[in-house]
């Protein structure tokens, strides 16, 4: 999918400076934006992480009732 987005001049300049500093990485603006969006979306969706860590939504006992023994 292609999309047109607006970047304020100051933000566009900061991105270009970052890309110029990296030099050899050969990352272009499109790749940079895609990576930034992926990172932002990953930070918002922690459901996979919570499932992995074993966080539960409800438990038969409270922590102050020595729940680890049950």
Image (cartoon, grey):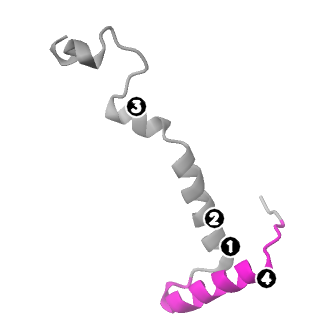
User: From the viewer's perspective, is 44 left or right of 49?
Assistant: right
User: From the viewer's perspective, is 54 left or right of 48?
Assistant: left
Is residue 61 depicted above or below 44 in this figure? above
Question: Is mark 2 in CB contact (under 8 Å) with mark 1?
Answer: yes
Foreground of the two, 51 or 70: 70
**Distance CA(mark 2)–CA(mark 4):** 19 Å
Q: Does the magenta stretch include residue 20?
A: yes
Instruction: Please give the label number shown on residue 12.
Output: none
Residue 60 on image: x %, y %:
32, 8
User: From the viewer's perspective, is 9 left or right of 67?
Assistant: right
| Residue interval drawn in magenta | 4-26
Residue under the point 83% across and 70% down: 6
Task: Using the rendered view, name the quadrant where residue 2 is placed.
Answer: bottom right
Which badge, 2 or 4, is on the more N-terminal residue? 4
Q: Name the residue under label 1.
A: 30
Question: Is mark 3 in CB contact (under 8 Å) with mark 2?
Answer: no
Residue under the point 35% across and 13% down: 59
Q: Does the magenta stretch include residue 33?
A: no
Q: Name the residue under label 3.
A: 51
**Distance CA(mark 3)–CA(mark 2):** 26 Å
Q: Mark 4 points at which residue?
A: 9
- Quadrant that contains the N terminus: bottom right
Instruction: Please identify the residue farthest to the left as the structure is shown.
Output: 69
Is residue 57 depicted above or below 22 in this figure? above
Q: Name the residue under label 2.
A: 34
């Amino acid at each position: 999918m292609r999309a047109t987005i607006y970047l304020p001049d100051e933000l566009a300049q900061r991105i270009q400076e970052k890309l110029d500093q990296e030099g050899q990485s050969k990352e272009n603006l499109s790749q940079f934006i895609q990576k930034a969006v992926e990172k932002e979306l990953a930070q918002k969706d922690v459901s996979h992480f919570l499932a992995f860590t074993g966080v539960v939504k409800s438990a038969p006992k409270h922590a102050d009732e020595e729940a680890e023994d049950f």
